[in-house]
Amino acid sequence: MKTKRGSQVLGRGLALAVLCSSAGLAAAQSSVTIFGVMDVGVQRLSNGGKNLSLVSIDGMQTSRIGFRGTEDLGNGLSASFHLEGAVGPDVGSGGDWRRRATVSLSDKAAGEVRLGRDYVPTFWSISRFNAFGTNGVGAASNLVYGFDGASSTAKTVIRSDNSVGYFLPSNLGGIYGQAMMAAGEGSTGKYVGARLGYAAGALDVAGAWSETTNTAAGAKFKVGNLGGSYTVDAFKLLGLYHVSKQATREQTNWVLGGTYTQGAHVLRFSHVRSKNRDSANGSDYSGKLLALGYVYNLSKRSSIYATTSRVQNSATGKFLIPGGSAVLAGQSSTGTELGIYHSF
């Protein structure tokens, strides 16, 4: 015969078992990750005749902190979120999610639908097919972004607000791609763009296109690019052709670079040539960037690096390495940096 106390103990035991099994199920279905990068160095810039020394950030990757999570909904379906913000470790700044703020639904067979603030398709070719990514004095983006290397040329040079994106599933035999649309919401920034690529073995190649309503009058900022990389043993060769257009203005860019990896040592080099034309006023100028860098990987998450680069302009060109003073037409710009990188 069961006593009242025995019944209470049994009931509490069953309740605890149910609670533990539910917690285990939730843990198996969901995951949240905190991640980030800290990248700080010292930099010397010489733009024209003016020199500047500074404690710099983001010489190899952008310093950031973020949170991402995934919930397994069963039958190949999952929901996820991604919140990521830049930080300035040199002065302790930061505290927003402007790098990325998205929520997604994914199906292993059908792909992913993603909403929020995210990178535009044409950005990924600049980052993926450049030996220095889009960071530091050696980055091709110092010339390639928008017009004259200015990410402020349009709201959508790097990312887009108010976007709805679709990504192909990862089981298509090396084919990858995405499409994105974004609402202007009564202002500039209405966007449409797409990217399609193929990666298998040593080869990776992709093309992308986009169009942004960039002025109140409806002028279109158009971008197209084609890039690729090929790996042979320790060598990786990278190339990119990138064009930006708006009204009578056009900038074409060619990027050629590579990396050589031997154990913990990585050598990087890049050559960029940009040409800017404006048929309305006959403006025609060009600039080129040469960069050489070295990375020593202390571990999988920590590195030290050094980069030096130089921008040379045509007689009327004003391309430069950002962070210092402006240059006069035809003047050169040089940069050197040493830094420490750590990811977590």
Image: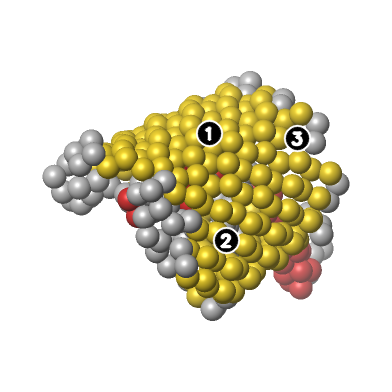
Task: From the image, tell me which residue sits under label 1.
Answer: 240
Mark 3 or 2: the one toward you: 2
Amino acid beneath label 1:
Leu
Dividing the picture into quarters, in which one does residue 307 lie? bottom right
Report the residue at 68% width, 28% height from top. Answer: 230
Label 2: which secondary element: strand
| Place of residue 259 in the rendered image (x, y in percent of width and height, measured from the top left) | 71, 41
Task: From the image, tell me which residue sits under label 3.
Answer: 235
Task: From the image, tell me which residue sits under label 2.
Answer: 335
Q: CA distance from mark 3 to mark 2?
A: 25 Å
Q: Is residue 178 visible?
A: no
Q: Camera-side residue: 115 or 155? A: 155
Label 1: which secondary element: strand
Label 3: which secondary element: strand
148 relative to 77, above or below: below
| Lower sequence index among marks 1 and 3 | 3
Q: Are marks 3 and 2 in contact (CB under 8 Å)?
A: no
